[in-house]
Image (tube, rainbow, N blue to C red):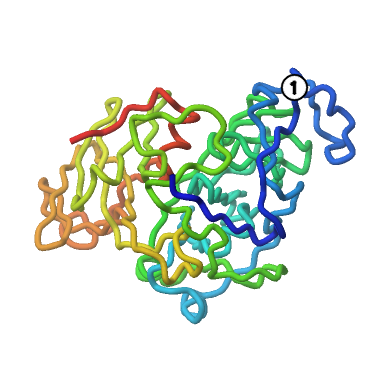
Amino acid sequence: MQKIRILIYLLCSIVSAQVFAEEASFKQWQGNAEWPKTDFSKYNVSPDEILSGGPPKDGIPAIDSPKFESPAFAKKWLNDLEPVIAVSHNGHSRAYPLQILIFHEIVNDKLGDEYIAVTFCPLCNASIVFDRKVANQVLDFGTTGRLRNSDLIMYDRQTESWWQQFTGKGIIGEFTNTQLSELPAQIIAFKTFRQHYPNSKVLSRNTGYDRPYGKNPYRGYDDINNTPFLLKGPVDKRLPPMERVISVSVENKSRLYPFGQLKNTAVLNDEFNKVPLVIFATDTVYSALDQSHISASKLIPSYTVFSRELDGVTLKFVLKNNKIFDKQTQSQWSALGAAIKGTLKGKMLKPLIYGQHFAFAWLAFKPDAEIYMR
């Protein structure tokens, strides 16, 4: 088995897994000095599922006062093909480079009138954006330093409840079983973001922290033959655990589209749980988890997912001369879901909630997921 070299900037020694609590209950932690607010009498997970990731509470610091700059300025330090999390809401668009998120994992932000948490778990390759408002309260999130199924466990500073990043669900404390609302987001190349959102903003490296932005502390992790770090329990054998997948959820059902099944596919028309959808391939991006420097890493595909329903019509998309058209009107579309030529020019497809993760993570939390096969 190939050894996994994981260098975490905040640690000065190799991190070993350790069980957070061996007892059958979390109640013993009530009044814990590290977690004075957490109500450990409420939980929905087993203590032995939670492991220490190495850093302590807030050892990986969230960004609470993010600063932004123009794409033209960010171009001085951000490579065209580096991956960014693109978020748009009511005419406001921002890019959050993974080269920054990899050292902070959470950005607490406000986009227009929307309070959002932009999150990235490197071990699961999970980029997820949440609405921070819960029951008319705006929450601020930080990192617990703990993992479950190799995934980041967040906490909110208001009640110190613990939340699973991959599912957005409260697992310990006052907000146990509370579900955060996930917001549409895309992983695309900085160049693609800049072209489609020229008047937008990019998260600045001026974070208030001294970190080697642009470097990857998880060198060599992005290898389909690797074993997930700190994953406790069996691995679903239907897919290689480190294979990248697109996950799509409709109500309580989910389907995974393995990258291997999408190879050489620029447009995929499909239907899942009665929802017609389309997957577009965008520009390739550098992996954030391959080489020591992200800009020297291997190129990987990136995809966007949209509903095919527009104004009561279910569109079907085709690729002609490397351009996307719908069959019904022959309008031309961008891979970001915008009609750029033809009778539908100016129209936008509705983005679906989806993710681009490592297969093991999705299957660990949602083992009933279907897997798309040609």
Quadrant of the image occupied by residue 37: top right
Lateral position of residue 210 relative to residue 125, left or right:
right
| 96 to the left or right of 197 | right
Tell me: residue 264, above or below residue 242. Answer: below
Q: Residue at x 58, y 40 (%)?
A: 230
> In terms of depth relative to the viewer, which is nearer, 345 or 37?
37
Q: Quadrant of the N terminus?
A: top left
Point 11% across, 46% down: residue: 328
For the residue labelled by badge 1, is the local secondary structure a helix, a strand or a loop?
loop
Residue 163: x %, y % from top left = 65, 35
Instruction: Quadrant for the C terminus, please.
Output: top left
Residue 325 higher or lower than 367, as above or below: below
Q: Position of residue 249 (x, y in %)?
A: 39, 32
Look at the picture and state if 44 lies above or below 313: above
Percent position of residue 158, x then y: 78, 40
Which residue is depicted at the point 41% across and 44% down?
242
* Left or right: 300, with 72 as reference point: left
For mark 1, what is the residue?
42
Q: Could one spot residue 90 in this view of the protein?
A: no
Inspect the image, locate mark 1, and give the three-letter code of the amino acid beneath it: Lys
Residue 47 is drawn in which quadrant? top right
Q: Position of residue 211 (x, y in %)?
A: 66, 69
Please tell me in which quadrant of the rendered image residue 83 appears.
bottom left
Q: Residue at the location (23% across, 42% down)?
A: 261
Which residue is the extreme one toward the front?
1
Q: How many labels, in total?
A: 1
- Left or right: 314 as drawn, with respect to 196: left
**Front residue (pair 55, 88):** 55
Residue density around tag 1, few if under 14, some if 14–19, many if 20 or more, within 10 Å = some
